[in-house]
Image: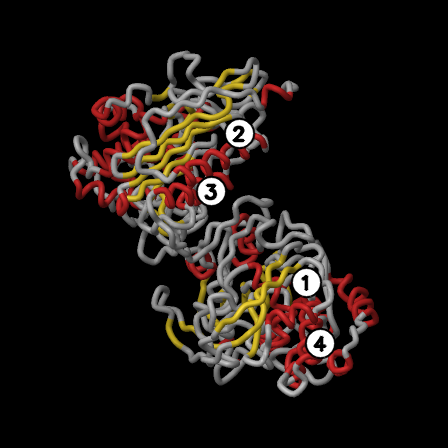
Amino acid sequence: MRIPFFALFLAAACTTARAPSGFDPAILAQVDSAVQRAIAGHKLPGGVYHLEHNGAIYEKAWGNRALVPSVEPMTIDTIFDAASITKVAATTPSIWLLIQRGKIGLDDPVQKFIPEFPWPDITIRHLLTHTSGLRPDLDLKEPWSGYDTAMQLIMKEQPVNRPGFVFRYSDINFEILGEIVRRVSGEPLDIFAKKEIFDPLGMTDAGFNPKPSNRIAPTEMTDGVMLRGVVHDPTARRMGGVAGHAGLFITVHDLAKYCRMLLRGGSPIFTPETVKAMTGVESPPNVAVRRAGGFDIDSGFSKPRGEMFPIGSYGHTGFTGGFFWIDPSSNTFFIFLSNRVHPDGKGNVIALQRELGALSARAAGYTAVVHSRVVWPAGGADAMNGIDVLVARRYEPLRGLRIGLITNQTGIDRAGNPTIDLLRSAPGVTLVALFSPEHGIRGAADEKVSDTIDPASGLPIYSLYGETRRPKPEQLAGLDALVFDIQDVGTRFYTYISTMGLAMEAAGNMKKKFIVLDRVNPIGGAEFEGPLLKGPIDFVGWHPIPIRHGMTVGELAKMFQAERPIDVDLEVIGVRGWSRPMWQDEAGLPWINTSPNMRNLSEAGLYPGIGILESAISVGRGTPAPFEVLGAPYIDGAALLRALPPLPGISFTPMRFTPEASVFAGKECGGLRMSITDRRAFRPVATGVAIATAIERLYPNDFAIDKLQRLLRDPATLDAIRGGKAPDWSADEAAFAARRAKYLPY
């Protein structure tokens, strides 16, 4: 159905329930702007926001509740399909109330309550924290209907991983929990939650399968009918509208009553001890992704935490467009409910989750950014790295093999689970040993690394950046295959690709299979730039490729195998859903620091050019922004900026800084701060060479130009810098284009 243009922007009455005393009006204005921009960008038709801090309340409604078949303005008392907020506002409190009453134990096996459940090692804790190993949802390809049918299908599920090792968000977990509530209490989840949770808190509009009301926000056109008061989630709809993972309808005021109950310690429903357990970290200690006893804390779904709410705050999101976050330490919570799927399912509030989380935290007085282990993208494509594809294939290429894994902290899946944990819990796969590259298995060392034992798994870790840089024959003797899963950054002298090449040679010598779990090139695979490696190879220049190579590790492995050549049985588990121009965040994939001084994607983008300079001047090592700043004690930043030619895709700001490590440690430096302004236009290697040329012209007696050759590895380019001329790489780049074309599957 075509929606009239004017309907999308029809002004709606915006209501404030209470005066926003205690909140900075400038921050509230930014909240207003953020929601208005999202509505104008067709991300949602409207929404309701509620912010509460130490008793001060601000709330507002924007936009429209409905666009089709007719326009209806949004109101604060709108009833929304809560989607997965059901998990934490209905199912989680019901389970914890039964735990509090002694009817259920957190570490009780599911079989205790559902004897026909076939997996004896899966517990209540595993279900609540999404660490059961079960897949995300039931199969909807074949027609089925009915609550009992859903339970029968669940009993046939085969876990993807053994329980207690990895986080995998799964509706099945909460469908099982809803059934446990029914079996233990003797009442269906909707009845139990209403009697024990909603009614005591005065949540008068909260419930499943609501009666028809024009206050209910419609969701999406399905089978020719606009869903309104009928659950949007297709599995819950097939189950009759009552399920542990979805089906709840709720208003912002009812959800606020629930949040207040948690902040005040649980009265009149829970004891403070129960609330602490329910909202604190309950995922097994060896699981990297942190979840509470139902709630989210620090995962790919915790975008409403923003950048400032502390880790330890908690909340949840819903597919239809709702989200909320609670911070006990500041006595704050915020809620945003919307029907972003209305009318055609194309809305998106992921960026708004992060923005409202940050603004709500600022309204509560927070000013400092809190960093997570993993940085989650605010959108992008739905690409899959090799490890994600391997999991989707249920580890079929590795089944029956004894493997050694070459990895570090960058070896994670889309959900942030370490590849180590995925493989050691994979059915039919035997993980025997770990091998670590430069910086060690956790990516924290800036020195040579020794062999050690992994404290989480008990597996031996053999260092490939210590006394040797390739696996030893005795370390490979008991293996069937070596698996490589490390995130490269697209630069020739970043040593992880050298480690891969040396390990391929070692595997070939021992007649062992070598399997690469491919990963997207984080700075894109469409562009390559710079001179080919000239002269002898070494660890920072292992193969004749340009400085920015524009290839994935899997593509490079195929090139190494063919061109060196390496006699090895090579298999590459490819990526999916990635196109070559995409940077990592554009592919929708999370970022984790790849080494101690590679802390974000902008630094990775600058590195091919700025890294060339690091032996001669400070490139920001020992500062909060490595590779985003550069300088030396003798440089005048403003003069250097004036000496630079126009350079596309980058901006410069003169500055002074004092690095605490590396070149010029402890000495005040003048220099430049750099920001990428256009990824597609930016040429990092040409930029680095232009900066070097300007420094050589301004400070020929101070600039140690010969030190550039360590990573540049091209005498002609060094001569061009000395002569103040732009180097010509066209022949090198044309030759490389012809070579690499044979190895590009994407």
Find disc 4 in the rendering and name its residue: 693
Place of residue 600 in the rendered image (x, y in percent of width and height, measured from the top left): 52, 60
Q: Residues under labels 2 and 1: Cα distance?
A: 38 Å
Q: Residues under labels 1 and 3: Cα distance?
A: 33 Å
Indicate whether 450 appears above or below 129: below
Indicate whether 597 appears above or below 389: below
Tell me which amino acid carries mark 4: Thr
Find disc 2 in the rendering and name its residue: 44
> Reading the chain from its start, which is encountered first: label 4 or label 2?
2
Place of residue 412 in the rendered image (x, y in percent of width and height, measured from the top left): 49, 57
Tell me which amino acid carries mark 1: Met
Indicate whether 164 appears above or below 45: below
Asked whether the viewer can see residue 474, the reply is: no
> Reading the chain from its start, which is encountered first: label 2 or label 3?
2
Element under disc 3: helix
Element under disc 1: loop
- Tell me: 620 left or right of 325: right
Locate the C terminus by quadrant: bottom right
Q: Residues under labels 4 and 1: Cα distance?
A: 28 Å
